[in-house]
Image (cartoon, grey):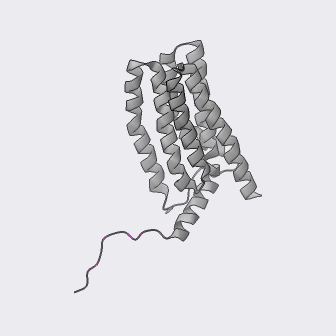
């Protein structure tokens, strides 16, 4: 008696490597997303400094919803496709990571009810954790460093009792710095 399995076949390593390459090409190693995210963190820092930490929370929260669309808008002038190929075996990982991050954001919002600064430190942890999955998504170990640095900075800022503006500024500096590194690597791969 032969049995057939309904279990989907696991992607081969070649498929994973091809899919990672496709993601790197389609999204410039994720550099533009990091640029948009870092810029939103910067705007939130300015709002925290000039207006209030509560307004900065909403700036980061609402701005965060615009990261992907704004990254796509930025990709066109740079000649970057802003999309991956149909059938990319890593497409689900990208969506799963996004949904997991969205499910964690209410935790940061609840932290803000106790202390506004904790929202930003919580978001640094959440986003840092999301970036760890980008190592598999793009096949770039630099994302382990980015994720770890964001997470470590959250703990340090919490320990220092840093205000909202400094916490948001820290997120901005880290993400924009890594955007530069990711984009340089992307350009060198294309050369």
Quadrant containing the C terminus is bottom right
Q: Is residue 92 visible?
A: yes
Instruction: Give yes or no for residue 11 being in the magenta stretch.
Output: yes
Residue 181 place in picture, x, y as percent: 69, 45
Chief SS of the magenta region: loop
Report x, y in % for residue 180: 70, 42
Residue 76 within the magenta-colored segment of the rendering = no
Quadrant placement of the N terminus: bottom left
In the image, 20: left or right of 117? right
Side of 100 relative to 67 (left or right): left
The answer to which quarter of the image holds residue 51 is top right
| Percent x, y of residue 40 | 58, 30
Q: Residue at x 73, y 57 (%)?
A: 190
Q: Is residue 37 above or below residue 116?
A: below
Q: Residue furthest right?
A: 191
Residue at (58, 31) in percent of width and height:
171
Q: Which residues are magenta?
A: 1-12
Seen from the viewer's position, the closer of residues 148 and 190 is 148
As displayed, is residue 164 above or below residue 27? above
Residue 65 can be seen in this image: no
- Farthest front residue in view: 159
């Amino acid at each position: 008696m032969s049995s057939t399995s309904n279990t989907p076949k696991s992607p081969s390593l070649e498929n994973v490597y091809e899919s990672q390459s496709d993601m790197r090409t389609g999204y410039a190693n994720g550099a533009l997303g990091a640029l948009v995210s870092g810029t939103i963190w910067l705007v939130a820092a300015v709002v925290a400094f000039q207006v209030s930490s509560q307004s900065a929370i909403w700036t980061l929260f609402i701005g965060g919803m615009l990261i992907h669309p704004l990254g796509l808008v930025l990709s066109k002038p740079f000649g970057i496709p802003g999309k991956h190929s149909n059938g990319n075996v890593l497409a689900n990982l990208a969506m799963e990571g996004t949904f997991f991050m969205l499910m964690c954001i209410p935790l940061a919002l609840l932290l803000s009810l106790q202390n506004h600064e904790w929202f930003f430190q919580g978001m640094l942890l959440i986003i840092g954790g999301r970036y760890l999955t980008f190592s598999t998504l793009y096949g770039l170990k630099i994302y382990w460093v980015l994720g770890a640095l964001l997470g470590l900075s959250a703990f340090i800022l919490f320990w220092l009792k840093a205000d909202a503006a400094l916490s948001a500024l820290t997120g901005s500096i880290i993400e924009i710095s890594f955007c530069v590194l990711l984009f340089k690597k992307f350009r060198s791969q294309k050369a």
